[in-house]
Image: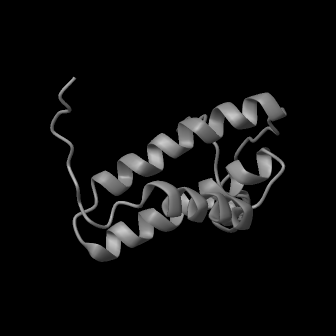
Amino acid sequence: MPTYNKLVRDRIPEVIKRTGKSFNTTILTQEEYIKELKKKSYEELEEYMESKNDEEALEELADVLEILHAFAAVHGSSINEVEEIRKKKAEKRGGFQERIFLVDVED
């Protein structure tokens, strides 16, 4: 029996059950959940970094976005509030669309 020890999407136990396989799960404490969400965010971002084409990239970005939704909820907020904060920061400091790469700054 493979051991995973990782946070999975809510419906994964249903998916496994339909295959007839047995499995074990546990419910994380809030502190454990945040820790595992952080680990999962690295996993999903790494999968995005390894994507080979636009389709794979978008699939992985959807996973990253799901993690962001969960992070917002953990902090008592929503993705809509995060989006508003993002917009304000973009107005003040810009985004990344212009592909500016800062080499150095003279003191």
Q: Is residue 78 left or right of residue 19?
A: right
Q: Is residue 24 shown to the viewer in this render?
A: yes
Which quarter of the figure has residue 96? bottom left
Residue that extends furthest to the top in the rendered view of this protein: 107
Closer-to-camera residue (13/31): 31
Res. 20 in view: no
Residue at screen point 71% across, 67% down: 80
Is 104 situated above or below 101?
above
Q: Position of residue 14 (x, y in %)?
A: 73, 64
Q: Does 107 appear above or below 54? A: above
Indicate the colouring scheme. one colour
Toward which corner of the image does residue 55 lie, by quadrant? bottom left
Residue at 72% x, 52% y is 72
Question: Taking 29 as reference, is 69 left or right?
Answer: left
Question: Percent x, y for residue 52?
Answer: 22, 64
Seen as rendered, the residue at the extreme front is 107
Residue at 41% from the left image edge and 61% from the top image edge: 95
Q: Is residue 67 left or right of residue 18?
A: left
Q: Quadrant of the C terminus?
A: top left
Quarter of the figure with residue 34: top right
Say which quadrant the N terminus sits in.
top right
Q: How many marks?
A: 0
Is 10 on the left-hand or right-hand side of 58? right
Closer to us: 82 or 45? 82
**Residue 50, image x and y in percent?**
27, 53
Q: Nearer the viewer, residue 85 or 91?
A: 91
Q: Residue furthest bottom?
A: 55
